[in-house]
Image: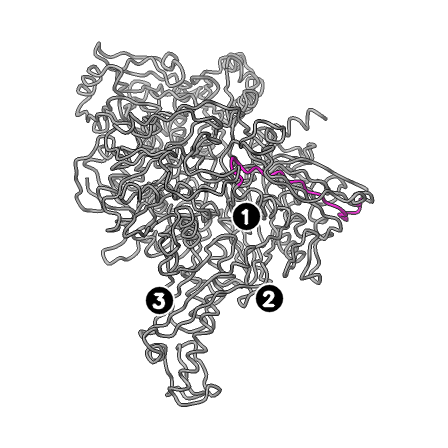
Amino acid sequence: MIPPPFTYHRAASADEALALAAEYGDEAKFLAGGHSLLPLMKLRLAQPEALIDLGPLRELSYLRAENGHIAIGALTRHHDLHHSDLLASSVPLLAHAAGQVGDPQVRHRGTIGGSLVHSDPASDLPAVVLALDGVLVARGPAGTRQIAAADFFQGLFETVLEPDELLTEIRVPVPAAGQAGWSFQKFTKRAIDWAIVGVAVQGGSVALVNMASTPVRAAAVEEALASGASPAEAGALAAEGTSPGEDINATPGYRAHLARVLVTRALQEAAQPDPEESQ
Amino acid sequence: MTVNGAEVSADVEDRLLLVHFLREVAGLTATNVGCDTSSCGACTVLLDDESVKSCTMLAAQADGHQLVTAEGLAGPGGELHPVQRAFRAEHGLQCGFCTPGMVLAAVSLLRENPHPSEAEVRAGLEGNLCRCTGYHNIVRAVLAAAGQGTAGPDARQAEPEGAA
Amino acid sequence: MSILGTRVVRTEDPRLLTAGGTYTDDLRLPELIGAARVTFVRSPVAHARITGIDTTAARAAPGVLAVLTAADLDDLPPGDGSPTAEPLLATDRVRYVGEAVAIVVTEDGYQGADAAELVSVDYDPLPAVASISAALAGGPRLFDGTESNVAASGGEPSAAGAFRDCDVVIERTIGNQRLAPVPLEVRAAAARWADGRLTLWASTQNAQLARDALAEALGLAPAAVRVVAPDVGGGFGAKIATERDTITVAWAAKRLARPLRWVETRNENLTGMVHGRGQQQTIKIGGTRDGRILAYHLDVVQDCGAYPRFGAFLAELTQLMASGVYDIPAVTTTSRAVLTSTTPISAYRGAGRPEATAAIERAVDLFAAEIGMDAAEVRRQNLVPPEAFPYTTPSGAVYDSGEYAAALDKVLAAAGYDDLRAEQARRRGRGDPVQLGIGVSCYVEITAGDYTGGETSRLVVDAAGAATVYTGSSAHGQGHDTAFAMLVNAELGIPMDQITVVHGDTDVVPNGVGTYGSRSLQLGGSAVHQAAVEVKDQARDLAASMIEASSADLEFDVSRGSWQVRGDPETALGWAALAERAGPGGLAAEVDFRPSSPTFPFGAHVAVVEVDTDTGQVTLLRHITVDDAGLVLNPVLAEGQRHGGIAQGVAQALLEEVLYDADGNPLTSTLADYAAITATELPSFELLASQTPTKVNPLGVKGIGEAGTIGATPAVLSAVVDAVAHLGVRHIDMPATPLRVWTAISEARASG
């Protein structure tokens, strides 16, 4: 319940945040919404020496239409993503999925950047950003770099970011006209739970939640779709290339089965001319 | 920070959780701790009018912000806030432990969605556990506070016979 | 018109809503200023010998006042010396993850969390006995000096010919899974000694029992102990027994000559607070092809957890209520209570009766499925008829009153049972992926099972005309303040806002039992009612002498709360005047109400679910109930109890389970993992009214607190099985999670 002692720093600017991170090396963590990090610290599963609070960096919370993509500040809260008219009209998959994260209180604090950097394969947004072929922009001492979502997630709670790098922006391409169909299927025991299995579909891109140690694209499904397979035919391949885990809620075999069912349903839903708002 | 309209400030341990700041430093004990995993919502308060789980925030993160706890909802003469009034009228509390957080979660929900359906109320309270009421009367209370009476579009209610 | 039976909102609520309740960790009393904090060190392993405890580093940590272990507990009375005695702090052995091993006492709680990690305990692991089957299979004995891990056994096997005349006999072993009570307020206590006297505040359901337990454990006279129950944030049976951890806190406060406070974390609570249920049941039911049940045998294996505590008694309650609402000629039960290296199990909302009901209802469903008869119809054919009451069951329970068929008919009609079956048939005919399931349960349960202990009430009417009720009952959400005030108002006409109800402080209410087992209205309320009647009798005599009339010529006007000569309001005397005349103590009466038997509420539930046969997902669409607990004093309170009970019953059927791995490591020790039910999994409930009074007490009431739970679980499970019965599924063990449902469907499909 109580985190171990640490030193709290409040960053007044992104530069200051980066300078502090450089000072601490891997002994410090950035604090965004804190709804992935603080729970771990309260259970003493994470014990950083220092926290660098990014909360004051309001300039990193934004949603802007740019050239063919939506630029999202890393500190944009799930609540704001969910209620953004811009996002709802241009990338409704992300707007909808953000409204499924946690509960209302969590969504008032948690940020897309925090969720992506936390890299929990059972979280919703990593798979969504992967399905959308998002690009993640990171700033470090050496400058800024852009990382494709497909390269970003390395493993359970692991990304390619260095400890002294700060995720500043996520660029989400606006889907092309023929790829506008979308669906988000989140299968849980209780509404509040993490997905036992989840599926994000945008056009012909299919990404899976909780079917491996990172979010994964269902490559076999995508190839089948590209070759003209029906949702059911493509959906049958959903578990290929995945390594679903076992826990108190599911066996690997059950997860694989759910993936097939949910991918099929997601593809069917995405194919409908006017997808419903609530899935 | 401002808590219930009054300025509160103190030097505290870096790791002090907001919920403990409110309970121990600000002396406001209505906000409760119910779990370790941000699951139960008993610690819910309003931060700048939005519901947050104060156990999942550092006090330091609330610096400069406006907090409202259950103690801050009633009027100056002790008049119940409309949501509190509805909770009483609909018997939406029993032991009362989840109630401060539940009421504040409801206040935030209604501010964002003034006319929720029953399903939206239930989804809006998914982050708040109650063990006593089975949620039935809590949902009625929130719908009543929203001025929707107790029969939302998809509410199901068989009135017990002989009810007064 | 009497206030009784009318809808009255609670007097408790304004304070709870505006200020929040004052729960044990909220106390800011002068007596607790400067209190230090206790943090427990608990075993992370299920079964091990302790070969050493090194407190050096912990004692040097910031803010640490003391680190205490069993070795320091050298000034307490010896235990009972039984081989399965349970220590306050583990001595040479731990037997479950979460068992207390040491305490650190610090200035504040944050320091305690740090220091507790620094206590170094050497554990020499022993093989765990982590399940009922492991305990039955033998396994290492948890206690030296015992022959096995079977702590108790009883009952008798079925008679040789009991099942002989049955066309159909079904036998099946099913589970009634371990649950965590999860009151929103975890366990907490605060202790202070002054002048050789202990004051202890604790989140308890029964202050007087706690006082006696503390006195005994600490070697004190009861008068040297005061226990105060502040507001209590839920109990559900898990806060009946006085926690050993509470006793340790009290003891340490004396040892350190400093007030101490303790509040556990939720994660501690999920392994440190008692669990509920935890039975393996073998049901055997036999009957004729036209639906008559002739014989039933229930074998119960009760998981006690690591210490016997309450386990054997739970099994007895299950045995007592085994035959439920059915008139079955031959009913026998056998039981064993086994020890496992897991958290001890005790009473949890229903305490043995949900288990009994779940078993007989499953058995009846299996019987119905076997003979191809509608589940409701089979029930109707076998219910105890109304003319049979009082009805003595083969297990020896004497049911006071019941209208079982009427309850069943009522709930089926309200549910639209025939329409539901028609919709189900349509979906089956179409082969819809989402199927409809309808589950029916009929139940009876025993409340105030410990009726011989009775309940106390002292009523005082003072010279201001106000009344104070001192009750041994101990509400933790049930609304007794409102209910008992209604009883006084109904009898004496004193306005509700001039009636105060006091409970939970042994200095103020020295004699009492407390609140559990759905006893409070029928025992505590009857005591209040009788005390009010006695006060009224005193008042009549006093009024007669004051008015100089004969009592026979007086009438009482309850609407004004006054005595007068019949038809002559000029002579009216109100409570203030009468109490003043009565003397310094006002008008007062004290009652210890002890009925001659328990009571047996009953009911019937219908659950309607949808099952997604592609995924196993279950959605509870509707839950309709009759829960008849006699006359209803306040429908608002009664409905609230039913709602809460139903939710917990649904939770057992669909979601919740405490899980351990084979090594006794808990797998559900956080609220993120333990699937406590939320608002999104539940519909609004449909409650029907039914009031079949009892003659056991003057109020005609039975206990409503646990009934909803008892009826709900089997109805919901039955509905889930029913939804996929056409695919060949006969049974699914609880909780019917998506994984379990899908597995059952897959297996049924695979076996053709």
Q: Which residue is the site of mark 2?
A: C695
Residue sitting at x 27%, y 36%: C106
**Residue C288 occupies quadrant:** top right
Q: Are marks 1 and 2 in contact (CB under 8 Å)?
A: no
Q: Nearer the viewer, mark 1 or mark 3?
A: 1
Real-space CA distance between mark 1 and mark 2, rounded to the nearest whole angstrom:
23 Å
Q: Reading the chain from its start, which is encountered first: label 1 or label 2?
A: 1
Q: CA distance from mark 1 to mark 3?
A: 34 Å
Which residue, given by chain and number where applicable, does mark 1 sit on? Answer: C350
Q: Amino acid at mark 1?
A: Gly
**Which range is magenta?**
C288-308
CB of mark 3 within 8 Å of CB of mark 2?
no
Quickly name the residue at label 3: C497
Where does residue C201 sit, x and y in percent of width and height?
Answer: 34, 49
Chain letter for the residue marked with disc 2 in the picture: C
Label 2 element class: loop
Q: Is residue B84 above or below residue A176?
A: below
Task: Determine the CA span between mark 3 and mark 2.
Answer: 31 Å
Determine the secondary structure under disc 1.
Answer: loop
Relative to the observer, which residue lies in front, B90 or C527? C527
